[in-house]
Image: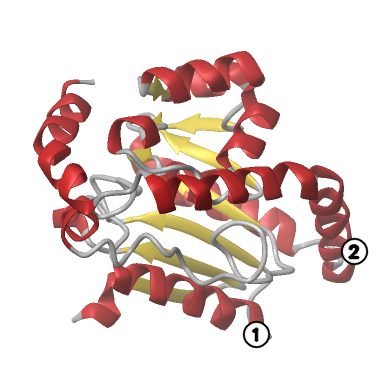
Amino acid sequence: MAEDHVLLDISERIATITLNRPDARNALSSDVLRLLPDRLRQAEASEDVDVIVLTGTDPAFCAGLDLKELGSTGGNLGGTGSRGRGPFPHVTKPIIGAINGVAITGGFELALNCDFLVASEHAKFGDTHARVGVMPGWGLTVLLPQAIGVRRAREMSFTGNFMLADEALAFGLVNHVVAHAELLPFTRQLANDISGNEQAGVRQIRSTYHAIATDDDQWETEARDGRAWSRTHFSPAQIESRRVAIQARGQQQ
């Protein structure tokens, strides 16, 4: 069932949202893009939730846009319909990304929009927008340089090469790398540490961090350029013709 493609579990004041299309490496279909903001709104509205954890069903965190759908109708190019910056609706509660496997392109942008990241030893990060023939739309060109520096960010975007978990830790993209089996227990412990604080204060500090880190001009530049590219260059047929090669190169890394 499509409703199972994004799961929500609430326990011990933690909402765990899980991308759940493992056979498709949790790729972003239209259904996933519809369900993800709904699950986030549910977590935000719940009085039983202080912290949100975003993860994926193994083996991947998220392989980005579903290339089959993108190459046929392009119906999943429109994103989540969020009216704010990035893929998420307005949320005041901290979001921790528990990155259990590959986080590629749109999946990488989901990770970047979390407040901070914990990575499994199996995690890999890649920006393959240039391989696919789509432009970032969820703040990658703003958030990635903030995380790892502009020169490393450009290298990732221009080459499409993957960054492994230990490199991500060394460059400051993730806060922790843990054994795969310990990913969720470790992340939940951090969430419990947050939950033990005064929540109005946590949410105000998060809001302040967000306001300082979000430069409207930079985000608008990315959005404007992405819209222009889509009007003049985006072609589902071309993406479909490249899909097998794109996937094969990704599997080699």
Neighbours of disc 1 within 10 Å: few (<14), some (14-19), many (20+): few
Residue type at numbered disc 2:
Gly
Q: Which mark is residue 45?
A: 1
Instruction: Report the front residue among 19 and 213.
Output: 213
Left or right for 32, reference 152: left
Q: Residue at x 22, y 29 (%)?
A: 250
Q: Which mark is residue 104?
A: none
Residue 35, horizontal then vertical, whole percent = 40, 76
Residue 134, horizontal then vertical, whole percent = 38, 43
The image quarter in which residue 182 lies: top left
Q: From the viewer's perspective, is residue 4 above or below residue 119?
A: below
Left or right for 137, reference 93: left
Query: Considering the image in quadrants, where does the C terminus appear?
Result: top left
Residue 11, horizontal then vertical, whole percent = 52, 75
Q: Residue at x 68, y 85 (%)?
A: 47
Neighbours of disc 2 within 10 Å: few (<14), some (14-19), many (20+): few
Q: Residue at x 16, y 35 (%)?
A: 247
Residue type at numbered disc 1:
Ala
Q: Is residue 124 visible?
A: no
Instruction: Report the front residue among 131 and 148.
Output: 131
C-beta proximity under 8 Å, tags 1 and 2: no
Left or right for 115, reference 241: right
* Residue receiving disc 2: 201
The image quarter in which residue 69 lies: bottom left
Q: Residue at x 51, y 53 (%)?
A: 227
Q: What secondary structure is found at the residue carrying circle 2?
A: helix
Q: What secondary structure is found at the residue carrying circle 1?
A: helix
